[in-house]
Amino acid sequence: MKTANNNLEVVVFLTPEYFEMYTEIFEKTLPSEVKDVTVYYKRLPPFINYTNKHKNLYKRIVTYADHVRGRFNEASSQERPPHMPCIDKVLFVDVDIVFFDNFVKQTCDILDDYDMAFQGPWPPDAKWHCGGIWGIRCNEESVNFLDNILLPAISPNSEEFFQRQEIGYPEKEINDILFDLENYDTNMRATTFPSEFGFLVEGSLMYHAVGHYPTVNEKMIKLRQEKEMRGI
């Protein structure tokens, strides 16, 4: 069921090495239709090994879960004035993104039908959910999924937990759960965004510099090129 609520909040997790990318690309191309933006600026320990990197990634997911829970509690509070706008849809995005067009209504329409939506795979017929573009409807189903299923599945029990994780952590664990969702005690409904969310296709709304651009500098060069090609 579609609603008239297009109150979408964009949330980005920013670390110092991506600050230039945020100010030059992300912030300048973000559509004016986005009225609510939250930036979590974190000075995390530098990448030393995969154990260290995985700890940082875990902290990010915890931050996401805390944010969704907070929005859900605000919307559910009886103390909230009836006239106060309710933000119940959040789009968590990586910094290495350049925006081309307004994506607010399409995102909200998808999150009216699903509790979560992830950037899809490339090619589109592959099976994968990318957390670099992750829409969440801040409702009871999403909160319960994050708190009772996802976080316990990726939480560290010891140093050895991180040392034995594959390079894909935590997206591999997230995908393992999503592809086996019917065997979990949850009513959370998940889908993937169309290819216009993240890929260079006709009608692309945003481009996410993943895959062939592993370093910050390589990402920055590619994002600048796409920004300049479109004159934005």
Image: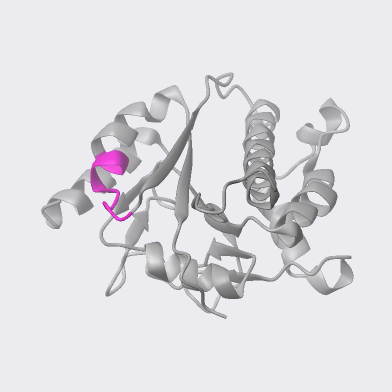
Q: Left or right: 199 with respect to 185?
A: left
The residue closer to the viewer here, 96 or 104, is 104
Q: Residue at x 25, y 59 (%)?
A: 100
**Which residue corresponds to the image point at 64% horizontal and 45% vertical from the top-left?**
74
Identity of the residue drawn at 52% across and 67% down: 120
Which segment did they paint magenta? 25-33
Q: Indicate whether 159 appears above or below 191.
A: above
**Magenta highlight on residue 228:** no
Q: Nearer the viewer, residue 156 or 166?
A: 156
Q: Is residue 87 above or below residue 58?
A: below
- The answer to whether residue 26 is magenta is yes
What x and y, as percent, mark residue 146?
75, 51
Residue 10 place in picture, x, y as percent: 45, 48
Q: Position of residue 14 (x, y in %)?
A: 46, 31
Q: State whether residue 176 appears in this view.
A: no
User: Looking at the image, can residue 203 be seen?
Assistant: yes
Instruction: Tell whether 216 sits left or right of 118.
Output: left
Look at the picture and state if 224 lies above or below 159: below
Q: Where is residue 57, by image quadrant? A: top right
